[in-house]
Amino acid sequence: MNGTELTKLALDIGFADVALIDTDKLVFVPNFRTLCEENLCGKYGVNYACPPDCGTVEEMQKKVLSWKQALVMQTMWDINDPLDNEQIKPAKAQHNQMTRMLIDQAGEPGLMIGVSGCSLCNPCALTSGEPCRFPKLQYSCMSAYCIFVKDMAERCHMDYECAPGITTFFSMFCFGRRTS
C-alpha cells in the first residue's frame, strides 16, 4: 500500500486526522527519556517495550529512521483531565487497537509506535523473567523513541492542543524500508 491508500484506510477506520511525514523530518529529543524515567505510566523497567529495556535513545531513533515514511494518526477524546486514568486508559487502548487494525489490514511491513507502552500482556513477561510473548507485535510509545510530538503534529498540520476538555493521542506506522 502506498501513503495515499494508508491515509484513506486510517480515515475509514475512524482516526480524526492523519498525515504522512518523512521519518527524517521527525525531531528526536534525547532528554525526553527522562519522562519515561519518571514512571508516571508505571511501565518503566517492567515492560520490554519501555525504557530501559526497549533500547537506548540512539537504538530507538535508528529503528524509526530505518523506514522512509510514517503515517501519523490522531484521535480526539472528550476528556477534561488528561491525568484521569479511568478515562485515559480505555481511550489509549482503543487508539492502539485502531492502529493495530490499520497495520493488519495494510499488510505492510513496518513499525508501530503507539500511544503509551505496549499492553499486549498484563503483566509483561519481563516481570517474571520470561521472553516477550509477542515480539513481532510489541510496540513502544513516542516518549520511548524520544519523538518531539508537538513538533511532529505541527509539521503534519495537526492540532496538538485542542479545545478545553479535548485530549488528543498520536500513533505512527513507519513503513517503506530504507535500502541504504
Image: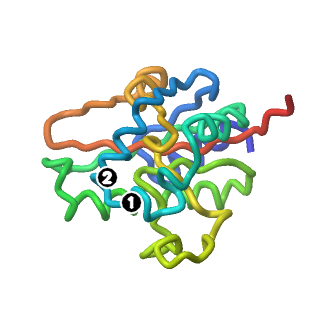
Say above or below: 98 vs 34.
Answer: below
The Cα atoms of the two marked residues, 2 and 1, are separated by 6 Å
Asked whether the residues under the numbered discs 2 and 1 touch, taking CB atoms below 8 Å apart as contact, a structural biologist would say yes
Say above or below: 164 vs 48.
Answer: above
User: Given the image, on which type of amino acid does mark 1 rest?
Assistant: Lys
Which image quadrant: the N terminus?
Answer: top right
Say above or below: 37 vs 154.
Answer: below
Q: Which is nearer the eye, 161 or 141?
A: 141
Q: Is residue 138 left or right of residue 1?
A: left
Please name the residue that numbered disc 2 is placed on. 39
Please name the residue that numbered disc 1 is placed on. 43
Crowd class of label 2 (few under 14; some 14 to 19; many from 20; radius 10 Å): few
User: Given the image, on which type of amino acid does mark 2 rest?
Assistant: Asn
- On the image, the x and y values in percent for residue 40 come to 27, 52
- On the image, the x and y values in percent for residue 83 come to 19, 51
Name the residue at 63% across, 29% down.
23
Secondary element type, mark 2: loop
